[in-house]
Amino acid sequence: MPTEPVTLNISRLDKMRLDKWLWAARFFKTRSLASQAIEHGRVKLAGERVKPAREVRPGDCLTLHVGDSDWTITVRALSMQRGPAPVAQALYEEDPASQARRQQQASERKLAASPEAAIKGRPTKRDRRLIHRFTDE
């Protein structure tokens, strides 16, 4: 049975709330996370801090700090629905310099794994014995 391709209603809206657009573009899992990021200054519109209710329009330039990545994007379209990733990626266009910077940061993180990333809570019995063997003897 053939399946139909998934399409979303990327409408011809002229403006919408910034937190709703970030949610629809899949930068954040929920609108409340998007609102918190905006309020903490991790999202800037044209280089300025804004509020979650600020309206975004196609052509606006956004600077985002999501996790360990910094994004510089231009809004291409607006969508009232959150859809699959390929459709969400059609809502924005990333600056080539931003994309290169993100790839550089990712490669640096892979090469220089931090030691605290390997620590997963309390030491096991075996780890404790190794620690005591190292420190006591």
Image (cartoon, rainbow, N blue to C red):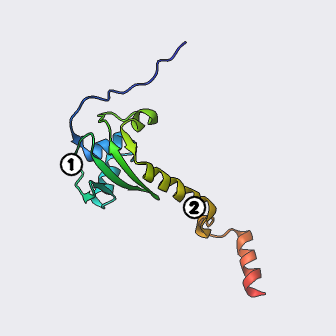
The residues tagged by marks 1 and 2 sit, at their Cα atoms, a distance apart of: 36 Å
What residue lies at 30% left-to-right and 34% top-to-bottom? 79
What residue lies at 53% left-to-right and 57% top-to-bottom? 104
What residue lies at 61% left-to-right and 59% top-to-bottom? 110
Tag 2 residue: 108
* Crowding near the residue tagged with mark 2, few <14, some 14–19, many ≥20 C-alpha atoms within 10 Å: few
Relative depth, front residue between 80 and 56: 56
* Crowding near the residue tagged with mark 1, few <14, some 14–19, many ≥20 C-alpha atoms within 10 Å: few
Relative depth, front residue between 122 and 41: 41
| Residue occupying the far front of the picture | 97
What residue lies at 45% left-to-right and 34% top-to-bottom? 86
Q: x and y percent of residue 124 in the render?
A: 68, 68
| Residue occupying the far top of the picture | 1
Specify which label sits upstream in the sequence, 1 or 2: 1
**Disc 2 residue type?**
Glu
Eyeballing the image, is 39 above or below 94? below
Q: Is mark 1 on a helix, strand or loop?
A: loop
The answer to which quarter of the image holds residue 22 is: top left
**Disc 1 residue type?**
Ala
